[in-house]
Image (cartoon, rainbow, N blue to C red):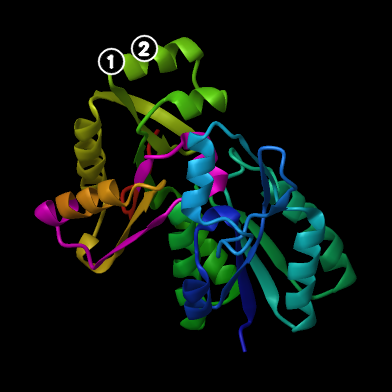
Amino acid sequence: MSTFEIFIDSTGEMHRAEREKYDIDYCPMTLSVGDEAEVPASLDYDQGYTSHDYYEALRAGKRIFTAQVRDSVFEEKFEGALKRNNDVLYISCSSALSKSVDAARKVASALMAKYPGRKIVCFDSLIACYGQYDMAVRAAKLRDEGKSLDETVAWLEANKYRFNQFCTVESLKWLKVAGRVKASAAFFGDIFAVKPIVISDRAGNNNAFKKVKGRKASLLEIVRLAVEAAEDIEHQTVYIGHADDEETAAFLKEELLKVCKPGEIYVGPLGPIIGSTTGPGTVVIYVFGKEVAI
């Protein structure tokens, strides 16, 4: 019996098989496509849309609207764990990208008053997607080794800046639609094939810290940056995420294997919560290693 249960949210990209493997659950955010009804943002795509369908909707000109985890979802998930006599560790999407962690902390405060002696920790990952996934997996392994909730949270706090993200987009159009870049910058950037390299900085923001000319050059650059940032790469999993672009994800994997030998390379889709902002063709590499300095 676990001493504490681990939860992520819809930006964590962890499908059912992996959640069952590591004994991790999630608190779904919500989304809607165009004028359709709002639905939970399922990590298993069981709401009638596949990952590909969401990106096809974007390509067709539809907007995807997203919202943070509802209080009622946190209440249901957290209280369920408390009733099972377990504490709770919620590893949230970066607070710079979602206010879900603030809502979770409010719910946690009320529940801990209701269940004296139980503990709920809402940990701001300062990252999303497979960085958040990796953090949750490492927490689960610590728990399975017998570490307490406090010991696990202490490790996360000491290492949270070591989860590195290196991302690039196919087009600036989607960042413009989401209000992340000026329309003029997006227009001229696409004309001249300028591609931003996006990291998750120490404040948890997606920070376009440099620009590269050309799609292939941007892909090679995120491979270079990932390998440079990684430590003990032979004994860790490197994560590659893609927004409906398996071919480019395969290219990244091939390029990584030319210059290093990771313990494992995990390739998976980026869900619509993040992907609706960055757009189809976005690719990202996550590694654990040197502390993020920016």
Q: Residue at x 69, y 49 (%)?
A: 100
Three-letter code for the amino acid on which mark 1 is drawn: Phe
Which numbered circle lies on residue 188?
A: 2
Q: Residue furthest front?
A: 60
Q: Residue at x 19, y 39 (%)?
A: 220
- Quarter occupied by residue 264: bottom left
Q: Residue at x 38, y 40 (%)?
A: 282
Residue 102 coordinates in the image, percent (x, y):
72, 47
Residue 123 coordinates in the image, percent (x, y):
61, 56
Quarter of the picture holding the N terminus: bottom right
Look at the image and tell me whether residue 77 can be seen: yes
- Residue placed most toward the observer, 226 or 187: 187
Q: Residue at x 80, y 75 (%)?
A: 117
- Residue placed most toward the observer, 251 or 101: 251
Q: Is residue 281 magenta?
A: yes
Vertical relation: 279 (above or below) 265 = above
1 and 2 marks in contact (CB < 8 Å): yes
Structural distance between the alpha carbons of marks 1 and 2: 6 Å
Vertical relation: 267 (above or below) 64 = below
- Residue placed most toward the observer, 167 or 267: 267
Q: Residue furthest bottom?
A: 1
Q: Is residue 177 magenta?
A: no
Three-letter code for the amino acid on which mark 2 is drawn: Phe
Look at the image and tell me whether residue 126 can be seen: no
Q: What are the residue bounds of the magenta stretch?
A: 256-284
Which numbered circle lies on residue 192?
A: 1
